[in-house]
């Protein structure tokens, strides 16, 4: 990380889905700023390893985000450890592929429970802390998939488009409380999961054809953007979406 944001030191930053990929690099980024970082994830072993790697100012709680009561309980426990939440990063998501004509109501509801509902209720839980402190920052993670009309992602793309909708309404409703809300829209980021599950030679050719930047994008590049938007360097930035896709769309 090249930039240093002294205002983040000592602040409690809560991140969903922080155990791997973009989330893990975001945990590392805030830890490097001397923030107090807590995160939840369903994958216990890698999350515990990450917390152990980064030391006493990083804490992990296992949580299946489809269970909102469990999410709120985890946030309460982590707040007891590190204090009121000053920054919320709604990162957790699952981009499982699916055919539109095969999607059932139950499958769609499950995708809502993973890709949208936790962000809504994590914000509901964190905003009172920010109000009491005189301000705070929320960064929601969207996806370029809804802009590009990606195939086999109809439910995911629909729900990720809602990340920007949620951003807009929260920014407007809580701007008077000095709470800034922004949305980062990643392109195709080369997390280990993407490499293992979805990246093919055809996909690599598509990256080189569609992106303005002719290289693969890395999770740390999203983490840097989130860090900036959470910091006082972005003190006048709210109600915005920032596309970080190498020029894909």
Image (spheres, rainbow, N blue to C red):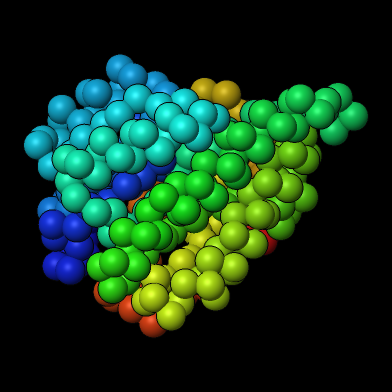
The residue most toward the left is: 56
Above or below, comparing residue 15 to residue 49 in the picture: below
- Name the residue: 61% across, 34% down: 113
- Name the residue: 40% across, 60% down: 127
Q: Is residue 215 visible?
A: no
The residue most toward the top is: 45
191 relative position to 109: left or right = left
Q: Quadrant of the N terminus?
A: bottom left
Q: Quadrant of the C terminus?
A: bottom right
Q: Position of residue 34 (x, y in %)?
A: 13, 53
- Report the front residue among 207 and 224: 224
Residue 248: quadrant of the picture: bottom right
37 relative position to 19: left or right = left
- Name the residue: 34% across, 34% down: 74
Q: Position of residue 118 (x, y in %)?
A: 52, 41
- Report the front residue among 107 and 148: 107
Q: Position of residue 53 (x, y in %)?
A: 15, 30
- Report the front residue among 133 and 236: 133
Above or below, comparing residue 16 to residue 99 in the picture: below
- Name the residue: 17% across, 46% down: 82
Q: Position of residue 154 (x, y in %)?
A: 77, 40
Q: Is residue 174 visible?
A: yes
């Amino acid at each position: 990380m090249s930039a240093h944001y002294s205002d983040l030191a000592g602040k409690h930053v809560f991140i969903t889905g922080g155990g791997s990929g973009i989330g893990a690099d975001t945990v590392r980024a805030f830890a490097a700023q001397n923030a107090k970082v807590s995160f939840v994830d369903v994958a216990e072993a890698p999350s515990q390893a990450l917390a152990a790697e980064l030391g006493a100012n990083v804490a992990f709680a296992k949580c299946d985000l489809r269970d909102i009561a469990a999410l709120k309980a985890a946030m309460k426990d982590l707040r007891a450890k590190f204090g009121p939440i000053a920054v919320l990063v709604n990162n957790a998501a699952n981009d499982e592929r699916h055919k539109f004509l095969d999607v059932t109501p139950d499958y769609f509801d499950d995708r809502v429970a993973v890709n949208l509902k936790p962000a809504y209720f994590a914000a509901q839980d964190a905003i009172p802390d920010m109000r009491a402190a005189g301000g705070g920052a929320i960064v929601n993670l969207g996806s370029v998939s809804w802009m590009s009309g990606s195939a086999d992602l109809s439910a995911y793309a629909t729900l990720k488009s809602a990340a920007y909708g949620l951003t807009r309404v929260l920014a407007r409703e809580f701007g008077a409380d000095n709470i800034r809300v922004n949305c980062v829209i990643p392109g195709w980021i080369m997390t280990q999961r993407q490499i293992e599950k979805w990246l093919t030679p055809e996909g690599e050719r598509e990256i080189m054809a569609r992106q303005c930047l002719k290289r693969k994008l890395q999770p740390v590049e999203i983490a840097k953007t989130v860090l900036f938007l959470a910091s006082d360097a972005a003190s006048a930035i709210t109600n915005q979406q920032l596309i970080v896709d190498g020029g894909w769309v």
